[in-house]
Amino acid sequence: AAKRTPLMAGNWKMNLNHQEAVVLVQKLAWTLSDKRHDFGQVEVAIFPPYTDIRSVQTLVDGDRLHVKYGAQNLSNHDEGAYTGEISGAMLAKLGCSYVIVGHSERRENYGETDEWVALKARQALKHGLTPIVCVGEGLHIRQEGEHVRYTTDQVARSLDGLTSEQVAGLVIAYEPIWAIGTGEVATAEDAQEVCAGIRAQVRQAHGEDVASSVRIQYGGSVKASNVAAIMAQPDIDGALVGGASLQVDEFAAICRFY
Ligand code: PEP
């Protein structure tokens, strides 16, 4: 089986002021820089608000920090009359490695559809950014037992138009909506069930090599206390962390799950 480097990602959402953001990056890099974190074994990425990215770039480049960074969203257009939007080209210029697309908060609050998410994923790839494509079911779908089918359908539509080579290199984040910001965590087995379903869907669409390369994260109330059980699952290759990524010691402990 392919060796997939785990990706631990911190989505700061719309939190912190600029000074707090700068301090958090510095403290995180400093905390992870001791010998207890193996950067070859685990990749760490943070997702600050757009307005902090330039300063994060300066810190990461200037001090050669082993932390990657990205944005929480991007426009599905290249440029033009799209007031308030940020393009993939702009993010690439800021040294972003990743961009989150289709987070459930954007799907729910801003009406982002799978079609839109697929456009954004393509836009990210066009500009050399690795998309983290988010999928996941709401509570009623889970209660009806339709969570695997629902989520794998979302994956198929959200990756529409991407080549197999592109799919092999991207990241899919399985985030059950009922577990985001609620303190409610899917059990490791529940998370594994859906992540295995997602990998099977990718296998069906793109073949074994792509399925064994694509990284699949779990997200939803991940903490230092539950991360090890989640990461022990064979189809889970990382975590997308919201609330806990704002606490430096907690997030550093999550990054050192091994
Ligand atoms: C998220 O927003 O991606 C997330 C998983 O949030 P939390 O960890 O706070 O549940």
Image: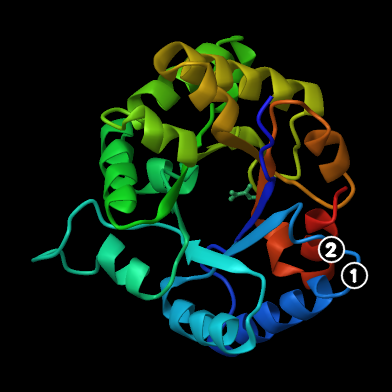
Q: Is residue 84 left or right of residue 213?
A: left
Q: What amino acid is at disc 2?
A: His
Q: Quadrant of residue 71?
A: bottom left
Residue at coordinates 78% horizontally, 71% vertically from top-left?
A: 248
Position in image of residue 180 (x %, y %): 63, 43
Q: Is 207 placed above or below 39 here? A: above
Query: Does the residue at mark 1 contact the one at mark 2 (Cβ under 8 Å)?
Result: yes
How would you rate the neighbour count of disc 1 (Cα within 10 Å): few for under 14, some for 14-19, many for 20 or more? Answer: few
Quadrant showing the N terminus: top right
Residue at coordinates 51% horizontally, 67% vertically from top-left?
A: 14
Position in image of residue 227 (x %, y %): 82, 44
Give the camera-side residue of 254 and 200. Answer: 200
Residue 153's mark?
none
Give the camera-side residue of 210 and 253. Answer: 210
Give the camera-side residue of 198 and 105. Answer: 198
Q: Which residue is mark 1?
A: 35
Residue at coordinates 87% horizontally, 74% vertically from top-left?
A: 34
Q: Is 245 placed above or below 120 here? A: below
